[in-house]
Amino acid sequence: MISLVNLLKEVQNSPKAIIMAGGASVGKSTVLRNLDSQLQGFQNLNADKYVENPDSPLYRNLGGASAKIKKEDLPQAIESKSNLIYDTTASNLKTLKPLVDQLENNGYDVMMIMVYAHPIVSFLRNYKRERKVPLIGLISTWVKVYSLIEDYKNIFGDNFVLVTSPPSSQEEKDQIEAFQTAQNQGKLKEYFSDLMSTGDYQSSFRKDDSTLSPDELEKIQQQREKTQIATEKSIEDLSQSFDRIQASLDPTSIDELPNLISNFI
């Protein structure tokens, strides 16, 4: 029979995994920086360390960097029983749930910290980063992630924490008001169209047309037309789900997060 002392030691020595979830540019890295002192020794598995490093062969290659994290870095961390932080949007339950099961089957205690920001706050912050996600990726991911809040609550129970990343500038506050006005009037498409027409919000993944042949340019234009249709559909989805998602939020105060992390660790 295992003694109580040995059982407590076994529990205390369980490796820890923290899944940082949330849409693009919502402030996950900022939340983590505020927890640096508590999370010393944790491996931070974030594709950005490859994507935003000019010396990396995966510089600006988000797909390749994400694949490296999933296929190499994460399995190695699990095999070595390292405490880890896995940075992900968590927009796909079908792929995340097996990962949670894998971690738990390898003896990990698993916690999810989901960071929420208003979609227009995410939008503005995204286009101030070096790596600027296209509008369709930004919006569709936002809708998918925060539509899964109840699912993640059921999976993680008390180890699910939702914190909000509030607006940090007057610009963000003003655009939240403008967004809400457009949402109330059913004119969210027009709102985003006006923003994009300024030319200030270009994706860093957009190809340089000047280097393309006429045939290549035609193909790119056709693809962009398809992307525009898909973007408009994503904005419709956002408009239909925004109020419901907002009403479902029950965030934990960011000031409580350090204590919750301490208890988990």
Image (cartoon, grey):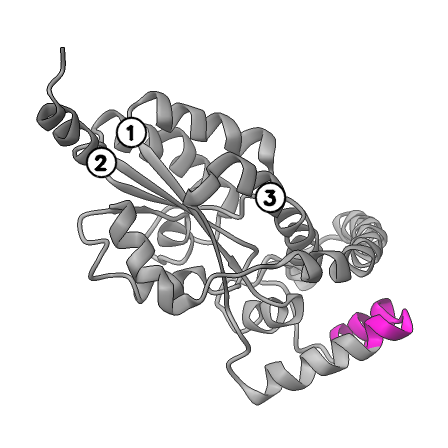
Asked if the stretch drawn in magenta spans residue 195, the answer is yes
Q: Residue at x 28, y 25 (%)?
A: 107
Mark 1 and mark 3 lie on one chain; the one further toward the N terminus is 1
Asked if the stretch drawn in magenta spans residue 262, the answer is no
Identify the residue under disc 3. Answer: 91
- Mark 1 vs 3: CB contact within 8 A: no
Q: Position of residue 234 (x, y in %)?
A: 78, 53
Residue 124, quarter of the rendered image? bottom right
User: Residues under labels 1 and 2: Cα distance?
Assistant: 6 Å
Mark 3 neighbour class, 10 Å CA radius: few under 14, some 14 to 19, many 20 or more:
many
Identify the residue under disc 1. Answer: 78
Q: Position of residue 2 (x, y in %)?
A: 13, 15
Q: Position of residue 16 (x, y in %)?
A: 28, 39
Q: Left or right: 16 with respect to 100?
A: left
Q: Residue at x 48, y 46 (%)?
A: 88
The three-letter amino acid code for the residue at tag 2 is Ser
- Mark 1 vs 2: CB contact within 8 A: yes
Q: Which region of the structure is painted magenta?
A: 182-197
The foreground one among 193 and 34 is 34
The three-letter amino acid code for the residue at tag 3 is Ser
Q: Position of residue 250 (x, y in %)?
A: 57, 59
The foreground one among 235 and 71 is 235
The local secondary structure at tag 3 comes to loop
Identify the residue under disc 2. Answer: 82
Q: Left or right: 35 with respect to 167?
A: left
Mark 2 neighbour class, 10 Å CA radius: few under 14, some 14 to 19, many 20 or more:
some
The foreground one among 180 and 92 is 180
User: Residues under labels 2 and 3: Cα distance?
Assistant: 25 Å
Q: Is residue 49 positioned above or below 10 on the image? A: below
